[in-house]
Amino acid sequence: MGRAPHEPGKHTPGSEEGQVSSPRGPGHEQDHAHGARAHSTDPAAPDRDGGETFSPVHIRRGTHEPGRRLPALAAMVVLAAACVIGAVLTWMYAFGAMRAYTGPALLALLLGVITYLVGFFVLRRIRPVHPPRLTPAVLATAWGLLAATGVAAYANTGMGGLWGQTLGYETAGEWTAALTAPLNEELIKLAGVVVIAVAFPRSLRSPVDGFVIGALVGLGFEVAENFLYALNSITLAGALAPATSVTDSTVVRVVLTGPGSHWAMTAIAGTAVGVLATVDWRPGLRRTLGALGLVLLAMLGHFFFDSPLLGDGLGAIAAKVAFVFLSAVAVYFTARHTYRSRVRKSLAQQGSALGMRRADAKKLASRHGRNKALAHVAQPERPDVRRRQEQMVEEAEDRAAQQALN
């Protein structure tokens, strides 16, 4: 990278210390710093890692590829309509309890806001390379909070009555939750991941993106469900200590069962959407079966979680939470490893072209690596270097998505 003027004798690290070099030498830094890229027309060629280099994808984050504007607009209409309908249904479902126990309802709302903020921060951070864009992340949680919760509340009631007539009310009393929620709730939440994928196609281009967006949808659903359960706990306890009932219910559902709850289930199912969206919704048999397996795994986890199997003791609850949580962890690290490998490989290719050491270029795939590289750069040059890092990472993610598609 060409160096900005600096004080005589002031040390400015070169590319070997993580600085992003300019590929065209001194005098051309301005074009590169502002994102100008040569439009390569060369065919893919082998690189030193044995893979292929791909022409850059010149579509900025937040824009839509040609031919996707109309589906994205339709998806936004569906999302807005579903959230409005779900909000109305949830209000109708909870209004009586909220009016009767206004103070405890406000406490439940406050606890829900805290859960949402902490969960939102953590789940966005688990995406490798950089967090998902704020808009699709917020809208994903909105689907879970409003659309999925409102529709599922009434769908569960209807299907619960059906199981009562089919299995008998004694058996249905034990198994209704396990037979109903995996079908209704998981499919409704999964629909939200699909809607986000269509509305914001560049926000869901890999299985790990599907995992994160699914986790955010599940987070929204979990926060809303915790609120409804907290209100319901007041009545179950005879309204003797409403604030205590709300607090106890929330703590149990967040601390004890939260690690294996809706965020994890929908993250697993959402990964299936990422598997399909990665290949532009034209999967082969292998991907189709893999996506189906992920959705079934999410449903199985939900079934096991809600079933009377193993009993209701603390050990049984811990086993159920562990099954769902560890399933989600296994899916996450598998998807994360594949995605990071592709991004790091692309960064190594770019680094070679820019005169950087390949090892230093690969480190840019993590936030820690980028910040560490900036620490070795003179303060006046950091804005330009940060901008070039972002360009390299964006290009690497474009190439990773293109490689998966090819």
Image (tube, helix red, strand yellow):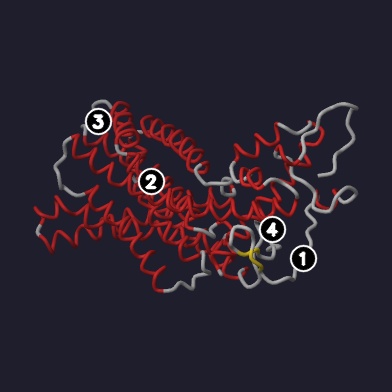
Residue beneath disc 1: 39
Residue type (three-letter) at the residue carrying disc 4: Arg
Q: Mark 4–mark 1 contact, CB under 8 Å?
A: no
Whichever of callouts 4 and 1 sits on the residue coming sooner in the sequence is 1
Q: Mark 3–mark 4 contact, CB under 8 Å?
A: no
Label 2, label 3: how far apart the Cα atoms are: 39 Å
Label 2 Cα neighbours within 10 Å, binned few <14 / some 14-19 / many ≥20? some
Residue type (three-letter) at the residue carrying disc 3: Ala
Label 4, label 1: how far apart the Cα atoms are: 14 Å
Residue 34 vs residue 94: left or right? right
The label on residue 60 is 4
Quadrant location of the C terminus?
bottom right
Label 1, label 2: how far apart the Cα atoms are: 40 Å
Label 3, label 4: how far apart the Cα atoms are: 55 Å
Residue 8 vs residue 246: left or right? right
Q: Mark 1–mark 2 contact, CB under 8 Å?
A: no
Residue beneath disc 3: 239
- Asked whether the viewer can see residue 87, the reply is no
Q: Position of residue 109 (x, y in %)?
A: 42, 35
Residue at 49% over, 73% down: 282
Whichever of callouts 2 and 4 sits on the residue coming sooner in the sequence is 4
